[in-house]
Image (spheres, rainbow, N blue to C red):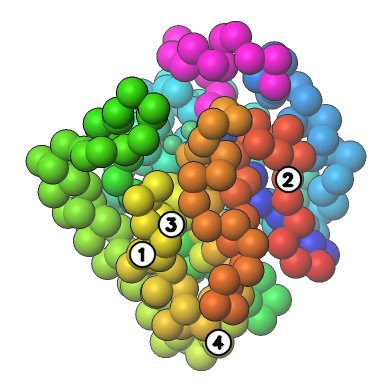
Amino acid sequence: MALYAIGDLHLHFQSPLKARAQMRERVWKNHEEVFRRNCEALLRADDTLVLVGDHSWGRSLEECGEDLRYIAALPGRKILTRGNHDMFWDANRTGRLNELFGGRLAFLQNNYFRYGDYALVGSKGHCFEGPFFLDARGRIVGWDEEAEERSKRLVERELKRLRVSFEAARADGMKKFIVFLHYPPTSILEEDSAFTRMAEEYGAEQLVYAHSHGESRFHDSVEGEKNGVLYSLVSGDYRRWQPLKLLD
Ligand SMILES: [Fe+2]
Ligand SMILES: [Fe+2]
């Protein structure tokens, strides 16, 4: 039995492809097939794979049908968190998704799932992504303050959701935690954040995130061990479609 994670499949079996990188970069070529083969070689029926958001380009549950069926057909137990592109997932109706896909897919928000004696907790998360103003050398000299204000409100909302997830697990006596976010826990301006502090507060052992695509974005946030928490980026293109093993 093992626990794995990956993010940002950006499937589009029934919907138009929207990202330029996905059309041009080599790593995205046939990525559905590459990822499926990797999973079939790696995952066993008693393994768990957490997919940390941006599952599909589809704008509705109907348009994501094929994409979600593709994920459901992968080996092992699949747990999903929300990404910023997951329009099919109404944030207030996660329970409904869990009913609809019961036994095939599990949706993580305002709840938690067990893996051995670990609680898998999570939310979409959020971090400020600009717009930043750069000087001629590409150094950040300022940013859009209105956008920063909006971003702070989203961070607050996601922090509440993450705390609900932690507290649900704690109420059941869970003491060991792994945190799954879609967004990186810190913006490029931050060394730490309310998300990293919450992970520390609950004694989480790991925090896993995705959302960052392309060479220039892979090292935007915390990586490796910091204050007792192990941070890992699992964007599919960064991992070359190979799920990262978190626990045996
Ligand atoms: Fe993404
Ligand atoms: Fe994203």
Q: Which mark is residue 185?
A: 3
Judged by depth in the image, the label closer to the viewer, 3 or 4, is 3
- Magenta span contains residue 39: no
Q: Amino acid at mark 4?
A: Lys
In the rendered view, does 91 fall on the left or right side of 29? Answer: left
In the rendered view, does 187 fall on the left or right side of 56? Answer: left
Q: Earlier in the sequence, mark 3 or mark 1?
A: 3
Residue at mark 4:
175
Q: CA distance from mark 3 to mark 4?
A: 21 Å
Q: Amino acid at mark 3?
A: Pro
x 36%, y 64%: residue: 193
Q: Residue furthest bottom?
A: 173
* Quadrant assignment for the C terminus: bottom right
Are the residues tagged 2 and 1 within 8 Å (C-beta)? no
Q: Earlier in the sequence, mark 2 or mark 4?
A: 4
Give the class, few, some or many, for how many residues have Cα within 10 Å of label 3's Cα (few <14, many ≥20).
Answer: many
x 20%, y 54%: residue: 152
Are the residues tagged 3 and 1 within 8 Å (C-beta)? yes
